[in-house]
Amino acid sequence: MNDQPLSPTPRHVVILCHPEQESFNASVAHAYSAEVRQHGHEVIVRDLYAMGFHPVLKSPERPGPDFTQFRDVEDELAILSATDVFVLVYPLWFGTPPAMMKGYIERVLGSGVLPRDVHDRSAKGVLAGKRMLSFTSSGLKDIWLDEQGQLQSLITCFDHYLQHAFAMGPSQHHHYGSIASGMEPRWVAQHLEDVRVHARALVSDLDAERAAGIAMAT
């Protein structure tokens, strides 16, 4: 359970990582955002490609005596500091998140973090106690990915690693396979409705937590 102070209006920050503005991933980000806004929550979408985010970590950004935090990283951390839900939307490319997404994690979440901080789970940054939600896609079938152990490996090595390293709250991961150009509109619509269902469930959980917190304070 999140024991961090909640903002007056719950905030969801959606990190979208796909080079195409009309991609399935972009549709997922838009569907999620529209649904939570409809329920009175705030949403900020950070479209990494549209922003021209620089994913390459520079030497001065490495932790140490000469550590430097660049302005773009400061801006992202300021946005994340007031969020209640950290949402990642990205495709799987060769079994892993795109380099742009990995660079965001390294430069922003990992800013100034030492290996021993991760080991000791003491890297309690701006997302400590916050929820993480991931929506991923692949052009391959889920059954094949499961046979390779790919999805579970991703969840273990990426989601759970981030959750534990940065002291986040509960995490969820929802994956959509067989996503390809020309796929039937009914499947796209079905997947996007699934996204809305997950968004509504999370909104309900957050609202219940807030109501309980207000009741305890009065």
Image (cartoon, rainbow, N blue to C red):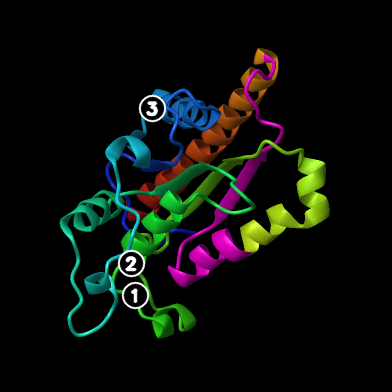
Left or right side of 76 for 187: right
Q: Amino acid at mark 3?
A: Arg
Residue 217 in the image: state x and y as whole percent. 33, 54
Q: Amino acid at mark 1?
A: Val
In this orientation, which residue lies closer to the viewer: 123 or 99?
A: 99
**Is residue 206 inside the magenta stretch?**
no
Report the Cα–Cα distance between label 3 and label 1: 33 Å
Magenta segment boundaries in residue numbering:
157-184
Residue 110 lies, with reference to residue 29, above or below; the image says below
Distance between the Cα atoms at labels 1 and 2?
9 Å
Above or below for 161 versus 130:
below
Question: Residue at (39%, 57%) from the top-left corner?
Answer: 103
Q: In the rendering, which numbered label is found on residue 67? A: none
Discs 1, 2 touching: Cβ within 8 Å: yes
Q: Position of residue 161 (x, y in %)?
A: 54, 67
Q: Secondary structure at mark 2?
A: loop
Residue 176, picture quadrant: top right
Dot 3: within a 10 Å radius of its alpha carbon, few (fewer than 14), some, or many (20 or more) residues?
some
Residue denoted by label 2: 125
Residue highlighted by disc 3: 37
Mark nearer the viewer, 1 or 2? 1
Q: Is residue 214 visible?
A: yes
- In the image, taking residue 160 as reference, residue 8 lies left or right, namely left
Residue occupying the point 64% across, 52% down: 95
Where on the picture, by quarter, is residue 144?
Answer: top right
Is mark 3 in CB contact (under 8 Å) with mark 1?
no
Where residue 147 sits: x, y (%)? 83, 52
Earlier in the chain: of badge 3 and badge 1, it is: 3
Disc 1 target residue: 113
Pointer 1: residues within 10 angstroms few (<14), some, or many (20+)? many
